[in-house]
Amino acid sequence: MIWIISGPSSAGKSTFIEHALCREITHLPSDAAVIIPGREANVLSRETNDCFFHYNILRPASFVRRRDKGTGESGMVGTRSDVGRFVDDPKWLELVAMEAPKKAIVLVTDRATIVQRVKERVIREKQSAHAQERPYNPARWLELLDKIDVDELYQAWCAELQRHDIPQVLIDSTDQNYRALKHIS
């Protein structure tokens, strides 16, 4: 089973993967592989099974390129219309094309909590146990969060999961009590 642990940046995906409730829901062992799209050390293959797919649902909107007319510099910025454009993410398309069974956990929290966590965050998830920590870029995610409606983002994500017949459970990740909001459908 591939368990998609999803939510926007700083929703608590990595923390949840390490929590006992995650093990209780998924029945995956504590040493199950964690695939993070876009990281060289994390590759999906036909043999991929019984793992976590650590998915930032802001990822597709972060691909949109913007040209700053004043400086000519480009940056990663999404817009309200970019919310829910999961078909633009090749790593997501690669995952849904796989025949392995999939279920999803959607970590839900409010915009204010996400923004606070983004501002406090210093490092990104490691690519592997032996990799060095890499700095987190809060400005990138704060700029994107300013342009989107978080509720619309969650609605678009749940619709995408339903479109691919991926059962889902919604978990409140505002704190580490992880209260279930919706059970697997």
Image (spheres, rainbow, N blue to C red):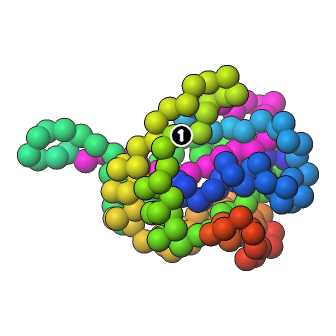
**Who is closer to the viewer here, 148 or 103?**
148
Determine whether 75 is above or below 78 in the image. Answer: above
In the image, taking residue 53 as reference, residue 67 lies left or right, namely left
Q: Is residue 81 visible?
A: no
In the image, taking residue 73 as reference, residue 5 lies left or right, namely right
Instruction: Kindly give the residue lying farthest to the left in the view shown.
Output: 70
Q: Which type of secondary structure does the marked residue at label 1 adopt?
A: loop
Query: Which residue sits at x=56%, y=51%?
Result: 56
Q: Position of residue 54 (x, y in %)?
A: 66, 46
Instruction: Kindly give the residue lying farthest to the top in the view shown.
Output: 130
Q: What range is drawn magenta here?
A: 40-66
* Quarter location, residue 178: bottom right
Instruction: Kindly give the residue lying farthest to the bottom in the view shown.
Output: 181
Q: Position of residue 99 (x, y in %)?
A: 78, 43
**Who is closer to the viewer here, 113 or 67?**
113
Name the amino acid type tagged 1: Arg
Query: Which residue sits at x=85%, y=42%?
Result: 30
Q: Is residue 44 magenta?
A: yes
Q: Is residue 71 magenta?
A: no
Query: Which residue sits at x=58%, y=59%?
Result: 11
**Who is closer to the viewer here, 124 or 103?**
124
Pointer 1 local density, CA inside 10 Å: few below 14, some 14–19, many at least 20:
some
**Who is closer to the viewer here, 42 or 174?**
174
All told, the count of numbered labels is 1
Q: Position of residue 95 (x, y in %)?
A: 67, 43
Q: Is residue 71 visible?
A: yes
* Quarter location, residue 79: bottom left
Q: Position of residue 177 (x, y in %)?
A: 75, 69
The residue to which callout 1 is attached is 124
Determine whether 168 is above or below 59 in the image. Answer: below
